[in-house]
Image (cartoon, helix red, strand yellow):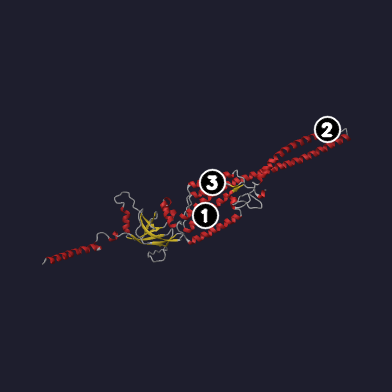
Amino acid sequence: MNKKNMSSLAVLSFLFLMLPISVVAADPSNSTGNAGNSAEPMVEGACVYVDNKCIFEKNTAEKKVTLGQIIRVKVNNLPALKERQRAHCKDVTSCQEKKIHLFLNRMELKGVNPLFGPDDELQFKLLHRDELPEYRDNKGQKTLWTTLFGFGDTWKRKQTIDVSIGLEDGSPLKSDATLTLVRWSSKGLVVYCVVMGVILILYGAGYKQGLFSDRGIIEDSTPALSLARVQMAFWFFLVIAAFLFIWLAIGELPTIPVSILALIGIASGTTLGAAIIDSSKRASARAVVESEGKKQTAADNLKTSIETKIKERKQLETSIKELSSSDPGSLALIEVKKQQSTDLSRTIEQLQGELRTIKAQLPGLKEKSETARGQQTAVSSRTFLDDLFSDESGWSFHRVQMGVWTLVLGFVFVGEVMEYLAMPDFDTTLLALMGISSGTYLGFKLPEQQPASPAAT
């Protein structure tokens, strides 16, 4: 056999010997370990568990999920994920294994822990935010929920979201599963619009009936608007509108932060303080007007009494003259009448002194009364802005300041509600600023003179 034939035979013999080894290596049944456990775990599908049904196929009817519903996730090789869950605890005492969390749009929802279903399924309940301590305490989680439900980027009612799972503080598994997230309810929005329409109608009716006006009495005119009452109505409307919107639109009963209660308290306290100040100033004005009236009445009564006494004295003097000429012997009676005349003269002098004193006081009282007369009743309404921001000297800076800060905080309030779909928690500095503004308004209101009402002039 030549060398060429021997070389060919050697190659064929080598390939023949290697063939069984290759077949064995390619045979899954003969591989070491379990092929299922070595495969990479991945999410095969997700569905919403409604009416005891859950269909994982992609081409089924649109699968919609809202807050409070259960999402079922089908996982290929779930045992391998559980092995990873425990892997970091090997040879470590008192180690807490990592939790499996739900991922939406590759964002981890902390606190949404799985309920184990069949061998290849996990179930997650899409909890409301107020049920998640992680949402209240973690800024990143607030940002996540804002991305899912907030109106900062889009007002779409629904959006398609990627669904996956993964280990705590890790990355999500590979997944092609999607669901349709219903961000707000169209029926809830209709109910919200109806309720807010009713509230606006009540506000309009209340405006015509003086709900937001001063409480003073004024004849043949409408009292001017009260800045404090308008501010309180403004905050009440914003808070109730935000609360109902979050509740009816996304089906979540929102928590009202302490700062919002403090804000309403500041507005209510300002209204109460303004009402007390107005009532006190009007009572003082009425007392001044009544004092001037009483003094004038007293002067008129004294004048009448003096005239009566003078007439009596003249009658006595006439009687004395008649007795002296007709009956000179009636000396005793004449002396009595002379004494009566003397007493009357003294009384007249005393009354005239009192009348002079009152007349000296009347000019000053009349001047005060003229000023107070326009302060004892409510101010007549003019324009909306003049009612809110002006006193007897025109527009007042402390009133404008209070109105501007109210509007600024109102815009911040509405912006945060729209972005986060949650009741905003105001910083204590902002609340202090609002309190200072309201306190300044009340402080300047004490000496403030209201514009004279046309009905009083």
The residue that appears at 88% across and 35% down in the rendered structure is 325
Q: Position of residue 408 (x, y in %)?
A: 51, 50
Q: Earlier in the sequence, mark 1 or mark 2?
A: 1
The percent coordinates of residue 42 (x first, y second) are 33, 60
Distance from the alpha carbon under mark 2 to that under mark 3: 79 Å
Residue at point 52% right, 59% down?
193
Q: Which residue is mark 2?
A: 335
Within the image, what quadrant is residue 350 found in? top right
Image coords of residue 116 (percent x, y): 36, 58
Classify mark 2: residues with Cα within 10 Å, few (<14), some (14-19) or many (20+): few
Q: Position of residue 63 (x, y in %)?
A: 41, 63
- Say which of 13 and 229 sits in front: 13
- Three-letter amino acid code at the position of disc 2: Glu
Foreground label between 1 and 2: 1
Q: Which residue is mark 3?
A: 437
Q: Nearer the viewer, mark 2 or mark 3?
A: 3
Viewer-closest of 66 and 293: 293
| Local crowd size for mark 3, using a 10 Å CA cut-off: few (<14), some (14–19), many (≥20) | many
- Residue holding disc 1: 240
